[in-house]
Image (cartoon, coloured by chain):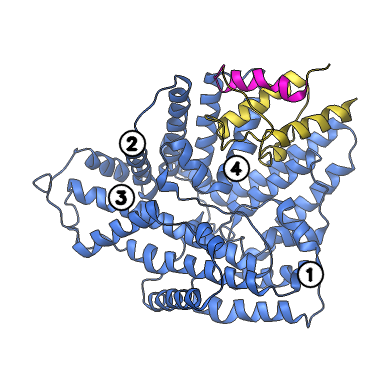
Chain colours: A blue, B yellow
Amino acid sequence: MLFNSFPFIFIFLPVVLLLYYSRIDRLSPKVFIIVVSLAFYVIAGIGALPLLLASIIFNWLLARGMRTQSDPVRRKRWLVAGLVGNVAFLGWFKYLGFIVWNIAAITGIQIAVPAIVWPLGISFFTLQQIMYLVDCYQELIPANGLVDQAAFVSFFAYITAGPITRSQRVVPQMQSPEIRNLNFDRMARAIVLFLIGLAKKCVLADNLALVGSNITPGKVLFLDTWFVVIAYAMQIYFDFSGYSDMAKAVALMFNLEIPSNFNTPYRALSVTEFWQRWHITLTRFITTYLYTPIVRSFRKVTLGISVAATIIAMFICGLWHGGAWTYIIWGTLHGVALAFNQVWKRYKLRAPDAVAWVFTFVFLNVGFAFFRAPDVPSALTTVGAMFGWGLNGGALLRFEMLPRDLALIFLSLGLACFGKNSDELTSEFTPSWRSAIAATALGLISLLYLNSTLSKVFIYRDF
Amino acid sequence: MPVSTLEKLQPIFQDVLDNPNLRIDRSSSALTVPGWDSLAHINLVVAIEHEFKIKFALGELEDLKDVGEMVDLMERKMNSKR
């Protein structure tokens, strides 16, 4: 069930909230959250439920086993077993087809692979549990009980596509029975945040997805190529940040605070700054649990080690998005750009802000040309056209893009760069007639678009 | 008088952030110190670990908001070793 759907907005969410705050069931908040989250998961597809439960139980048992060991060598073995188990679980569902495809391409050996549909949110809940195991291993947190573990992993606000949340962030909040007391102020803020997210998704992202549908197939024009790629950059931002706002809002409706994922990323003046503002919870995972252990294994962190660790970590980041060379190239390109930023900084080079912004934004769009492409040759065609290679439509400044689509692209770009972000808007929010009318209007417009046939699944739901 | 943890941190910050004139205090943070980004943060942590013979848990690193919190955590770790 999608957050941007009538059944979720008008049935699932209100019913669940009514039950939560009426307390007619007398369940603890954690047990209540498990029941409704598993219901949400089953509605999305019952077949994946045993896999989710298996993952929860596996990690619960491992952490408990690890914490009972006093011998450091044995504890490490438990950790390694846990990491291997989680990576193998993720690999089986997400990368088996990709590995077999590559073997066939290199050796010509064809291996039949059954069509595997991976469990909803597997990439996200697996990362959460890897962080949990490492934190337990380093004695930062105690091992969760089974109920804590199930509530932490399955919470329906973030199971679909994050924000990637750590156990110590949510489990302590879920301990208090008082989180089943309704706080009107917080609920109002949560509703406003949900409506902002819904508008980003239905009004902007879903319309941006249709940009360029009038363009003649096979005709490669310079400006149209740029417009289409920038439209995708805007689409994925409003899609994923819209989803993240809704996820954060849904958690807040249950009196739970989870981390933010975006902070106006297209204002970034470097690729390093972009990653501090884009998919922030993934960036934290990559820096803390991938980059750091790599550089830490060396006695002194030199520029060379830092550069190599960055590229390796971002290669894995690309692969995490899916088994496809387009994602791997996208991640590795970002790794190289981050490494370039490090060298740039080490030599204290400076560029005017406007130049830095243009270079960063151009680079991000080259990256997205790979990210959105069905395969590497198509991506190369697009990137080539962005720099004047392989054009076949006539004069350089000719374009077919409709004025309506151009207006949407520039409006989105303006909002993304100059508008207040969702966190700023909700922190400034005070309940008043004016804000109520504005929020209602935003909600109605979003529902009108939601009612049209445009509505699409979230891009990151497939990761 | 023994040198405080904060004073011992000064040359590490100057070296990692490549700024010999840098002076940090307890309120210094990634927001106020030029060049202290997420990668520099990790490099600072690795340098501190080697210098003070302590080990941070990975999950502790992102919660360190400023130098004051870093000094407090370091002192807790050094005291628990004694």
Which residue is label 3 attached to? A229
Which residue is label 2 attached to? A359
Counting residues from the start of the chain, the first of labels 3 and 1 encountered is 1
The numbered mark 4 sits on a residue in which chain? A
Instruction: Compare residues A349 and A89 and report the one nearer the observer.
Output: A349
Chain part drawn in magenta: B4-20
Q: Image quadrant of residue A206?
A: bottom left
Nearer to us of marks 3 and 2 is: 2
Counting residues from the start of the chain, the first of labels 3 and 4 encountered is 3
Classify 10 Å Cα crowding around label 2: few (below 14), some (14-19), many (20 and above): some
Q: Amino acid at mark 1?
A: Glu
Which residue is label 4 attached to? A284
Q: Are marks 3 and 2 in contact (CB under 8 Å)?
A: no
Q: Amino acid at mark 3?
A: Val
Nearer to us of marks 3 and 1 is: 1
Classify 10 Å Cα crowding around label 4: few (below 14), some (14-19), many (20 and above): some
Q: Main secondary structure of the magenta part?
A: helix
Q: From what the image shows, is residue B19 above or below residue A172?
A: above
Classify 10 Å Cα crowding around label 1: few (below 14), some (14-19), many (20 and above): few
Q: CA distance from mark 1 to mark 2?
A: 50 Å
Q: Are marks 3 and 1 in contact (CB under 8 Å)?
A: no
The numbered mark 2 sits on a residue in which chain? A
Classify 10 Å Cα crowding around label 3: few (below 14), some (14-19), many (20 and above): many
Q: Residue A3 location, x and y as percent? A: 53, 70
Which residue is label 1 attached to? A178
Identify the element where label 3 is drawn: helix
Q: CA distance from mark 2 to mark 4?
A: 24 Å
Identify the element where label 1 is drawn: helix
Q: Residue at 35% x, 29% y: name it.
A: A351
